[in-house]
Amino acid sequence: MRDLKKKNKQLLLIKGIFIKEIKIMSRYIGNWIMIITLPYMLAGIFLGVGYAVGGKNASINFYKNTGISDPALYSILGGAIMIATMIILENTGGYIREEQLIGTFELHYLTPNSTLQIWFFHILPIATIMIGIFSITITPILLFKGNLLSFSEWLIAATVIFLSLMPLAGIGLVIAALTVRFKEVWAIVNVINSGITLLSGFYYPLEIFPEMVQTIALLVPSSTAVKILRTIIQHRYTSLNFGPQIILFLVLSMIYLSSGYITYKRWENAARKNGELSKY
């Protein structure tokens, strides 16, 4: 009976956070329009530079060097995943810093809910919205090429995105711990985002790097997610066995979420003892 009440309490907490975040995000339609169009802008910049340097043979040179025949779709797809990754990493620490600045951070400690659960559950609505944003972003280029995905292909792509964002949620909890400890989020996020962007291959194939770098890149979930999504969307292969990649996502989720949990609890307890929770 207690377990049932506990589960109901957690479901109500998730529902409350989900509804609150959706209401808040619905106020910033301009931001979401920018997020949807940004992959096209970035792709346009890279394609423009490529054609400026390579001229008419730019696409041919790109294919010879990377084996990719459609640089526009390749870049837009990579940009969409890059933005989703950055938003997930930024939001957890950003929520805490915002609560600190407006003076409501300590109020969470007056509720019967775990603060760790509160910050983690904030990631769920963001992950759901990112899947929707990804779908909206990719649809125009696929529609232009007459190559829309089927429902099953969209479902597989959405599942891959969600699973790849879970390890990032663990990294987000580490950022949350750093925010509680050092009262600063953006400098930390920028450093982490730079490393993840470098090792994810959003705009270039990771095969151009040495094998050691490619092996390290496996620790970054977005690198595997980009490869799977490009396989599904560009080559329409959904019958391939993605079992090893799914297992990798689950293993990384356990490692990063555990690390995030331990780091956050340790620094939160230290902040309570030292009186630094309300020190901004």
Image: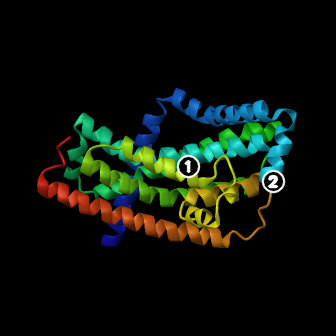
Disc 1 marks a residue whose amino acid type is Thr
Q: Is residue 121 left or right of residue 85?
A: left
Mark 2: few, some, or many residues within 10 Å (few <14, many ≥20)?
few
Numbered disc 2: secondary structure: loop
Residue under pointer 1: 197
Residue under pointer 2: 67
Mark 1: few, some, or many residues within 10 Å (few <14, many ≥20)?
some
Residue 56 visible here: yes
Disc 2 marks a residue whose amino acid type is Gly
Q: Position of residue 258 (x, y in %)?
A: 39, 68
- Give the distance between the C-alpha atoms of the residues marked 2 and 1, in whole angstroms: 21 Å
What is the quadrant of the N terminus in the image?
A: bottom left
Task: Give me the residue at 30% from left, 43% from top.
Answer: 184
Task: Point out the residue furthest to the left here.
Answer: 274
Dot 2 or dot 1: first in sequence order is 2
**Viewer-proximal residue, 193 or 236?**
193
Residue 1 visible here: no
Q: Position of residue 39 (x, y in %)?
A: 64, 37
Q: Is residue 104 left or right of residue 123?
A: left
